[in-house]
Image (spheres, grey):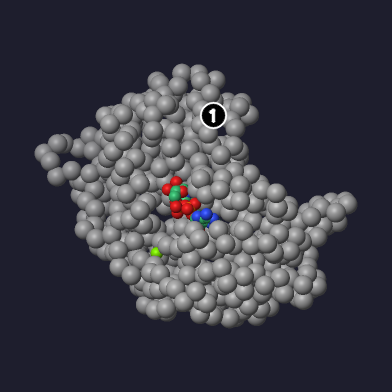
Amino acid sequence: MTRKKLNQSTETKTASTPFVFEYSPAPQETNIVKIEKKNKLFIDGKFVAPKSGKYFATLNPATGEKLADLAEAGKQDVDLAVKAARKAYKNVWSKISGEERGRYLFRIARLIQERAREFAVLETLDNGKPIKETRDIDIPLVAAHFFYNAGWADKLNYAFPGHQVSPLGVAGQVIPWNFPLLMAAWKIAPALATGNTVVLKPAETTSLSALLLARIFQEAELPDGVVNFVTGAGETGAELVAHKDINKVAFTGSTDIGKSIVQATAGTNKRLTMELGGKSAHIVYEDAAIDQAVEGVINGIFFNQGHVCCAGSRLLVEESIQDIVVKKLKRRMEELRVGDPMDKNTDIGAINSKEQLNKIHSLVKKGREENPDFFESSCPLPKKGYFHRPCFFNNAASSSTVSRVEIFGPVLSISTFRTPDEAIAKANDTNFGLAAGIWSEKGSKIHKTALGLKAGIIWANTYNKFDPTSPFGGYFESGFGREGGRHGLLPYVEVNS
Ligand code: NAI
Ligand code: MG
């Protein structure tokens, strides 16, 4: 290992000259996972070929190469999955006790832990996020969500004191590609704990970890049909949410598709939860511990390539410290390693798809036309695959595209404020309301600011910390309903008396 100045120029070492430790490559072995060439649907406890007869490819975004073919579920396949879930609901899952449901969930959680490395590698291959994130964040949280909800299964009377609750029936769930297995866990674990059965559609670019989860369900001897996976793209998702025999739709994804699902289900009896986009603000006051705040801002926007619905994509910094914060941000960004997600030292992996990379490129281009005060890390990018350098727009107007549109990439917009009231007003000046971060050494200032913010999740002196005991969800165009915590059980039950 050698310590080396990143910029190979003649400049002397200053506080703003970044240094990186050059590590030898430390790639994670990938032969721990076995990927079937042609994958089937998971219906009624078995892997079955699609009646549609159609398949499509899933790629490794770090190379652009094909990993496998996935089945494309058509109308008839979705119908078979819903029928299996209904049968399992009627005959088994609604009949057994909460304690028994809990036992299955505990077993699933333990099996996920046992095969955690395999899940992490598979997720990184299919999604492009760094192995250190799948290994240390995604997969441990997946197991934690199953453990946490397992604990509630026989204690629902305590979750809703004084009330009797009953399950809704069959839940149709549609999830995105940014946290593939974690979103599956967020949706499946509370649904099963409360006595519902599930048909879930993973995102078309990241379905492989759900199919491995199906094998865990088989190993745990989860009764057939309790969880079914239908792979496919938007059309499959639309078939699922439109199916007459589902009682509940849970969706995480883009605001546009969320709105179309709300419209498509209007007038039906289906209960909805929508977890949509965000344009979350980080407020950094001049009394904040600046180095920690900079680290938090970096984590808030560059974690998972910015593919995070609650990403802290707008930095609001107190005017008096703008210059020092911007200088420190640049220095830290130059140290971020962008590249092979399978390397244990990589900080920023691959953008999930070519489409998403094109979307980021076009928004950055538009941003540069509107605001030339642009900084991009100088790191080299791999020759193959879909990658984007971490970057920011300084002094971005609140009305500019990069301050208003969810980019879903490693792109930050920075603007300033002078008073707490101005910070609150600017943070709330968005169509979204998912998350916010406040950085200050003064507790009273943090509380006052938090009370003024319209955001479902507010972090103080930290960011992007997730915990299964904490409810998660937004205001306005960020959606409605909560996932996680005791609150996350409510969307899956009928409160009877
Ligand atoms: P998307 O909203 O199209 O996809 C999310 C899921 O919905 C996928 O499983 C997809 O197959 C499914 N879907 C698509 N059309 C559907 C329909 N009509 N009915 C039912 N299900 C449908 O998101 P996409 O196209 O992958 O990404 C576009 C943008 O959305 C991103 O650039 C980002 O800004 C945002 N996004 C936000 C997410 C979040 O967690 N808030 C997650 C993913 C994307
Ligand atoms: Mg993929």
Position in image of residue 285 (x %, y %): 47, 26
Which quadrant does ligand 2 occupy?
Answer: bottom left
263 lies above or below 145: above
Residue toward you, 5 or 76: 76
Report if residue 167 is visible in the image: yes
Report if residue 439 is visible in the image: no
368 lies above or below 190: above
Q: Secondary structure at mark 1?
A: helix
Residue denoted by label 1: 428
Position in image of residue 327 (x %, y %): 31, 32
Left or right, 250 with respect to 312, comes to right
Q: What residue is shown at x 62% (from left), y 55% (from top)? A: 250
Position in image of residue 450 (x %, y %): 60, 31
Q: Which of the image's four quarters has the N terminus?
A: bottom left
Position in image of residue 416 (x %, y %): 41, 24
Residue toward you, 140 or 93: 93
What type is the residue that disc 1 sits on? Asn
Q: What residue is shown at x 63% (from left), y 77% (from top)? A: 44
Left or right, 390 with respect to 491, comes to left
Q: What residue is shown at x 70% (from left), y 49% (from top)? A: 267
Residue toward you, 203 or 346: 203
